[in-house]
Image (cartoon, grey):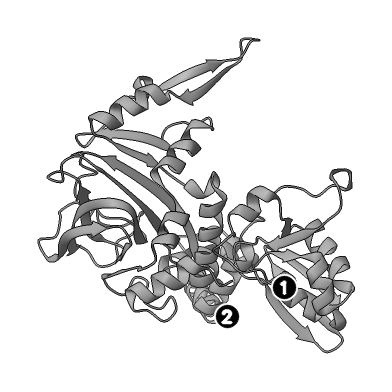
Amino acid sequence: MEHRLTSAIETALGWNGAGGLGKGFARGSIDDPDLISRVLTPNRLLDIVMRRSMNRPQFRVFQESREVHPAIYFTDSVSPRGQSIPMVNMHSLGRLLGEGATVILDQANVFDPTMEVACRALQWWSRERVQVNAYLTTNKASGFPLHWDDHDVVIVQLAGEKSWEVRGTSRAVPLYRDADPNDTPSQEAVWSGTMKTGDVMHIPRGHWHQATRDGHGSGRSLHVTFGITKRTGASWLAWLGDWCREKEIFRHDLDRRDEAPLHALAEAAAQLVTDRPPTDFLAAYEQAMPLPRQVPFLDVFGTLDAVVCTTHFAPRIEEHGETVDVLASGKKLTFMAKALPSLRLLLSGRPVPLAQAVSVVGAEAAAVAEILVKEELCAVLTPELSSGYTGLVTNAAS
């Protein structure tokens, strides 16, 4: 899937592909105002918040580096039948933002099609899980105090400006579950300065950082942080722990009084490491991801006019002479070889109007599309989902 934002991030950071993730601090700028405003604006973020029932910690507000109690900006919307739904009180939220505050929406990709598609494109690009958080800060509000993240982040400044301080690591590649609390900030200065509209920054896992609008006077800042969680050696060993249950020797009790079985166990563990190397784990990880949430296709809603592949990672297409296998989201689908052109088109990650697909690859495209939608590797391209691609991802049949 070719996404304008992914390409722009690569260019801004001087990367060629995702190989730079986690390798070192990088910063650059996207010289495309239309792209930046297309991704997200402050008003669109507030509109998302206004129209949905949200709860902490997915939606939070901070003032002076302290979290504002949800009771101040949440209220219960009561229906005529007395049903109560928690909603953000936009009047109260507006007052807080007027005073100076930071609004945080975690996993904006769950609520907004544009953010959903951007994360999917970055997942196909990086072959790792991606989520995006949005941060809207007004006036002189400060953000979180100095901290580090247990994942790599790519930050895109979408509006206004914000000052940042980035330091080195105190512990090399720290983990969320680790043998060291890693709570002493590094004194190594990596970069400090102001992120302005269009600027992009990559902060590797473990680097200490903080951001603020203190000293910038009145105004606002909106940035999105794409959190990219890469697999580690610890992830691989945890996966091996699940596979070991397949062998009887690992299911026996450990006996302190007899060392012979313990030596055999160590040998079996070494063999397991050899039999299932990290490359197998990485391939299995992509295939093990569950099917994404999507609108179901039902005949009663009308005909299938357009589809798009929505798997978390790009499906694998394997040719076997007269047949073709598609592997994705724990599924393996087998097609006749003549379906290959249709599969390449429909599983490209780009929207596919079926009328155009039929004209490009033949009549079987419609039948293949119905199978992929039924198996939930592709989704119905609703107007709402389509809006996440418009102007950012080209039509696959173009």
Image quarter of residue 271 = bottom right
Task: Residue at 53% x, 68% y: name it.
Answer: 3
Residue beneath label 2, please? 275
Looking at this view, is 234 or 14 the one in front? 14
Mark toward the viewer: 1 or 2: 1
Quadrant (top left, top right, bottom left, bottom right) of the C terminus: bottom right
Closer-to-camera residue (209/134): 134
Q: Name the residue nearer the viewer: 134 or 336.
A: 134
Is residue 311 found left or right of 234 in the rendered image?
Answer: right
Question: What is the x, y in percent for residue 215?
Answer: 12, 45
Q: Disc 1 to disc 2, how far (Cα)? A: 42 Å
Q: Position of residue 122 (x, y in %)?
A: 49, 65
Residue sticking out furthest to the front = 34
N-terminal of the pair, mark 1 or mark 2, is: 2
Query: Is 199 placed above or below 135 here?
Result: below
**Disc 2 element:** helix
Position of residue 84 relative to residue 177, above or below, is above
Answer with left or right where residue 94 lies relative to residue 381: left
- Which residue position holds label 1? 397
Residue 236 in view, yes or no? no
Amino acid type shown at disc 2: Asp
User: Measuring 19% from the left and 51% from the top, which residue is drawn there?
Assistant: 183
